[in-house]
Image (spheres, rainbow, N blue to C red):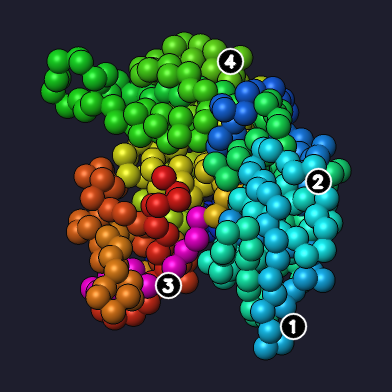
């Protein structure tokens, strides 16, 4: 009987030498550190940037006691007793931005507008809807309590208090919070610089005439868009042919000009040996087989000081590996103190899905809410790693874990919605 040997592959039940998806991610995260650097930017340009230093308040917010409603400022001693009415003389009016300087006296009330500074001696506000007014006299009943409808100085923020910690991604609400302190500029983490190129003689640039056996490059555009949305400065280096010297020059140029390098293609078994050889010569790069579908071949490491991600060439595999592996690493490199939330949901699957134990499978799904408020997911159909249309039709990843087998219709699966991820 003749014998022959083969290499392990993604067709095997348990591919020899493969890392689990979680182990691959753990290895990446352990091998990288935050890229240093920060810059001072106007507050108007700081949304979605990462705060480089804590924000400490130099003032109380609110800066003074003020009314939370339109009504009448009084002294608590003039509140009505049970089953009685209180009658007070209105001696003036105070509006926001124009403080009343005359202290309130017993038996008196001052009409006050929302946000206006409380007069001296006043400590309670009666809402105008709860007052009966006749000329300069008001009357109200005993439903009210001392101190109501008054915002105290420093109630929201106290002078010297740290209100925002370093390492958070700034939201519109946080921009407003900083503005409430009167701060016009803040220090944020410097944006990461990312060099990006595709490899292969079969790849065409947009605008080139079609050629036999060639395809247009989509990977640079999907990756570039994802990186730009994260606030990265993207250096698009185009398409690098399968030529040793051009590849060597590209890697050296990228490492000299960027914090991070992304490539797509050239990391699979059977692809040009000199790609791997040049990476080995120019940096410390490991080539991994990861037990994940799509996206099995991944290269990761460093070229000089730049972090290197070599993603697969298939368009869907590029996007899956970017969001499952590269994105958590980018969050750490960017200096986020806590990763952004990309919450998973357990959702009923409306159809059976073939799946074997021993690898993580990421399927493209359509997540929808039913009339009863529950959520349901189905696949987009064919799940080939070259079917980029399936990504554009999907609104979620269906994540089938390493040890999970086939899915029956009606069973629950883990879903990662694109909203908040993309």
- For mark 4, give the secondary structure: helix
List the residue tagged with mark 1: 81
Viewed as shown, does residue 291 lie left or right of 411? Answer: right
Q: Between residues 422 and 372, which one lies in front from this camera angle?
A: 372
User: Which of the two discs, 2 and 3, sits closer to the camera?
Assistant: 2
The spot of residue 172 in percent (x, y) is 54, 41
372, above or below 402, in the image: below
Q: Which mark is residue 102?
A: 2
Give the alpha-carbon distance from disc 2 to disc 1, as whole Å. 27 Å
Q: Secondary structure at mark 3?
A: strand
Place of residue 197 in the rendered image (x, y in percent of width and height, measured from the top left): 42, 23
Q: Of tags 1 and 3, which is closer to the observer?
A: 1
Q: Which residues are magenta?
A: 342-355
Q: In the image, residue 59 lies at what x, y percent?
A: 81, 40
State the residue position of label 3.
346
Q: Quadrant of the N terminus?
A: bottom left
Q: Is residue 136 visible?
A: yes
Q: Is residue 150 above or below residue 259?
A: below
Q: List x then y, in percent, for residue 299.
A: 52, 38
Q: Nearer the viewer, residue 400 or 165?
A: 165
Disc 4: which residue: 257
Q: Nearer the viewer, mark 1 or mark 4?
A: 1
């Amino acid at each position: 009987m003749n014998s022959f040997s083969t290499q392990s592959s993604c067709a095997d039940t348990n591919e020899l030498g493969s890392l689990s998806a979680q182990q691959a991610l753990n290895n990446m995260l352990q091998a990288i550190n935050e890229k240093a650097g920060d810059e001072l930017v106007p507050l108007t340009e700081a949304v979605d940037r990462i705060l480089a230093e804590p924000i400490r308040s130099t003032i109380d917010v609110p800066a003074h006691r003020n009314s939370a409603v339109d009504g009448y400022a009084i002294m608590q001693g003039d509140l009505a007793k049970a089953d009685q009415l209180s009658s007070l003389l209105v001696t003036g009016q105070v509006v926001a931005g124009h403080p009343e300087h005359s202290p309130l006296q017993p038996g008196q009330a001052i009409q006050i507008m929302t946000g206006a500074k409380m007069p001296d001696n006043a400590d309670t506000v009666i809402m105008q809807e709860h007052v009966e007014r006749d000329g300069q006299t008001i009357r109200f009943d005993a439903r009210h309590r001392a101190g109501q409808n008054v915002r105290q100085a420093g109630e929201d923020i106290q002078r010297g208090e740290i209100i925002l910690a370093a390492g958070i991604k700034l939201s519109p609400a946080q921009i407003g919070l900083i503005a409430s302190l009167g701060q016009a500029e803040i220090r944020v983490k410097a944006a990461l610089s990312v060099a990006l190129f595709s490899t292969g003689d079969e790849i065409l640039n947009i605008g080139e005439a079609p050629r036999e056996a060639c395809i247009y490059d989509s990977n640079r555009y999907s990756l570039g868009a994802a990186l730009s949305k994260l606030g990265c400065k993207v250096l698009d280096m185009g398409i690098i042919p399968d030529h040793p010297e051009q590849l060597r020059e590209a890697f050296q140029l990228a490492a000299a000009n960027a914090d991070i390098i992304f490539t797509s293609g050239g990391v699979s078994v059977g692809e040009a040996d000199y790609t791997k050889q040049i990476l080995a010569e120019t940096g410390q790069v490991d080539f991994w087989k990861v037990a994940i579908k799509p996206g099995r071949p991944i290269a990761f490491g460093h070229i000089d000081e730049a972090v290197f991600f070599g993603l697969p060439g298939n368009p869907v595999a590029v996007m899956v590996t970017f969001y499952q592996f590269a994105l958590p690493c980018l969050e750490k490199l960017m200096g986020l103190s806590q990763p952004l939330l990309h919450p998973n949901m357990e959702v009923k699957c409306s159809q059976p899905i073939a799946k074997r134990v021993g690898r993580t499978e990421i399927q493209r799904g359509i997540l929808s809410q039913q009339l009863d408020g529950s959520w349901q997911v189905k696949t987009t159909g064919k799940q080939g790693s070259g079917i980029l249309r399936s990504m554009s039709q999907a609104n979620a990843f269906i994540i089938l874990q390493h040890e999970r087998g086939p899915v029956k219709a009606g069973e629950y699966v883990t879903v990662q919605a694109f909203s908040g991820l993309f």
